[in-house]
Amino acid sequence: MTAIATSQGADKLGDLPSLTGGFQAAFIGAAVVALAGAGLALVTLRTPAVGGKTGEPAKERIQA
């Protein structure tokens, strides 16, 4: 994100509009990366299998 901000003008300390524009570009870049990660998570995460004995506690073997 630092590279995006610097390339868009965040390195110009005396020029406030360029400074603001650089940081705005960095935040937009971060939002794009976050949305891509959320989309990838939605596609790759699996849902639990339907059926079977889900939700029941495991039976323990008691040894005497």
Image (cartoon, rainbow, N blue to C red):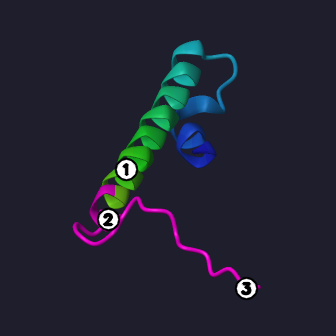
Q: Residue 16 appears at what percent x and percent y?
A: 59, 14
Q: What's the CA distance linking mark 3 and mark 1?
A: 47 Å
User: Does 54 appear in magenta?
Assistant: yes
Spatial distance from mark 2 to mark 3, Cα to Cα?
33 Å
43 on left or right of 61? left
Q: Position of residue 53 (x, y in %)?
A: 33, 69
Depth-wise, is mark 1 or mark 2 nearer the camera? Answer: 2
Instruction: Provide the residue span drawn in magenta.
Output: 42-64
Secondary structure under the numbered disc 3 in the rendered image: loop
Which is more toward the observer, 18 or 33? 33
Q: Amino acid at mark 3?
A: Gln
Q: The residue under label 2 is which amino acid type?
A: Pro
Quadrant containing the C terminus in the rendered view = bottom right
Find residue 6 and report its horizontal and vertical position in percent: 60, 40
Looking at the rendered structure, which numbered label has been put on residue 27? none
- Rendered image quadrant of residue 41: bottom left
Q: Which mark is residue 48?
A: 2
Percent position of residue 37, x then y: 41, 54
Residue lying furthest front:
64
Instruction: Determine the secondary structure under disc 2.
Output: loop
Query: Which residue is the site of mark 3?
Result: 63
Image point 56% across, 37% down: which residue? 5
Disc 1 marks a residue whose amino acid type is Ala
